[in-house]
Amino acid sequence: MFDKHDRVLVVGLGRSGMETARVLRERGIEVIAFDDVAAALERNRAELTAIGASLVDLDALHRAAAHLSAAVLSPGVPCENAALALLRRAGVPTYAEIEIAYRLSPAPIIAVTGTKGKSTTTALIGHILRTAGRRTHVGGNIGSPLIRECSAAAAEDWVVAEVSSFQLEATHAFAPRISVILNLSPDHLDRYASMEAYAEAKYRIFANQSGSDAFIGNADDPYLRSLRASGNPRVMARDFWFSLDAATDGVAIRCEGGAIVWQQTTRRAVRIVPVDALRLRGRHNLANAMAAALATLVAGVPAAEVATALRTFTPLAHRFATVATIDGVTWIDDSKATNPDAVVKALQTCPAPAVLIAGGRGKETDFSALGRTASERTHTVILIGESARQIGAHIHGPVRHYASSLREAVEIAARAAAPSQYVLLSPGCASFDMFENAEQRGDVFASLVRELRDRTVAPS
């Protein structure tokens, strides 16, 4: 895509941006690096200088813009970033990191997006392929940046990519061999003007696919159903659908008779694996497992090998993971539930009534559905973070507490929960008001629960 005569600007020096700079320099391409956060520039100055990249501030970028071949954007760069406005005025073409990764990759890519379940499904697809003996690279929003994984791949390998709406926005030719959309629900409305705009960003995952590619979608999702319409011109790839409802017509995989069933042909259905053999819990995770199974079946993995891998996959951290059971109370870390719909799914999985810990930094979010479900399925709701009062306004019936810290929330939950009940950390919000990221939030929660367990265990 680029050659040694090109000058490429990397905008944003987080994980993705730094890996892009490294990969481009390894190929002898001139790299100029920019970040409007001064600390990011200083933190990476030594390494960027060592690999032969130049660093610029906004003033220097004004002077350099006319001489740039292209710019590569990190996914965290906001739309209103001053550098982007400058690049648009100068007519500099901009690309997402995943676009560059795709163009560099000799291997076929399975790309996964959706509002919820992306990481679990991406990891599960990687697990199935590896279990089946395929050399596999997993990256994107999960693991290492996609550009590094694609650079390391050989033609006979597979690359599995978790991609977000932010990453898809700046794609032009990105065309994975297999694309997957798990679900769509309101999220990131602090970035997108409407739910429709958010959905359009997600739909870019299949926008450049051809008839030799495959698209996999959730037939149960109200936003995706329109894509199933006969002759819909938007999906040019072969389309395959999955459904939790055994009665849904025209799907390739469904849940029927307590098992995941593959409709291999119009006359032959193959029972892949019993639902109770999965280590993943909840109907939302069952849908993730069905999507992963379908993607790998389409990729050519035999059904028996798919079944073996589905049975052995261990759930990822911070995604409805059991931390401990203390005096009959089960403590669940679902810190990666960063939007209200994910909380609804988690509460539907927990036996009612539960104790819910929720809150954090909202994303111009409507919490009404979360409030309705929490009001029906909890007896106590403990709220933290910037959105605490906003969420609390939608809770009717359960006891509400407002905690100033996660530690205080855990202490309140310990007093409120009774044996056989669940305490669920499922925030429904981003973590950045109190923590570096959702992983740190989950780690702190797990540490606090273990402290509680250690205090509770009677001395021998």
Image: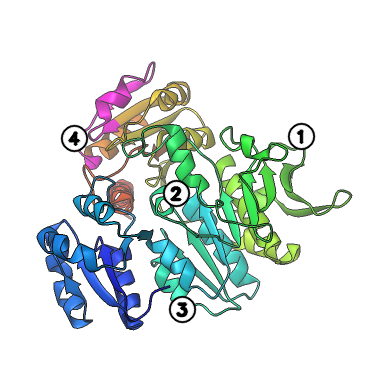
Distance between the alpha carbons at the discs numbered 2 and 4:
24 Å
Query: Can you tell which mark lies on residue 319?
Result: 2
Residue depicted at x 38% and y 27% = 366
Q: Is residue 145 visible?
A: yes
What amino acid is labelled 1 in the image?
Ala
* Marks 2 and 3 in Cβ contact (< 8 Å): no
Query: Can you tell which mark lies on residue 247?
Result: 1
On the picture, is 57 further left or further right than 437?
Answer: left
Distance between the alpha carbons at the discs numbered 3 and 4:
46 Å
- The image shows residue 99, relative to residue 389, as above or below, that is below
Distance between the alpha carbons at the discs numbered 1 and 4:
47 Å
Q: Which residue is mark 4?
A: 404
Distance between the alpha carbons at the discs numbered 2 and 1:
29 Å
Mark before the other along the chain sequence, 2 or 1: 1
What amino acid is labelled 2 in the image?
Arg
Mark before the other along the chain sequence, 3 or 1: 3
Does 73 lie within the magenta span?
no
Badge 2 element: loop
Number of residues whose C-alpha sits closer than 10 Å to that of mark 4, classed few (under 14), some (14–19) or many (20 or more): few
Task: Assign the C terminus to one quadrant of the image.
Answer: bottom left
Residue depicted at x 35% and y 31% = 365
Query: Can you tell which mark lies on residue 152?
Result: 3
Distance between the alpha carbons at the discs numbered 2 and 3:
29 Å
What amino acid is labelled 4 in the image?
Ser
Badge 4 element: loop
Number of residues whose C-alpha sits closer than 10 Å to that of mark 3, classed few (under 14), some (14–19) or many (20 or more): some
Q: Nearer the viewer, mark 2 or mark 1?
A: 1
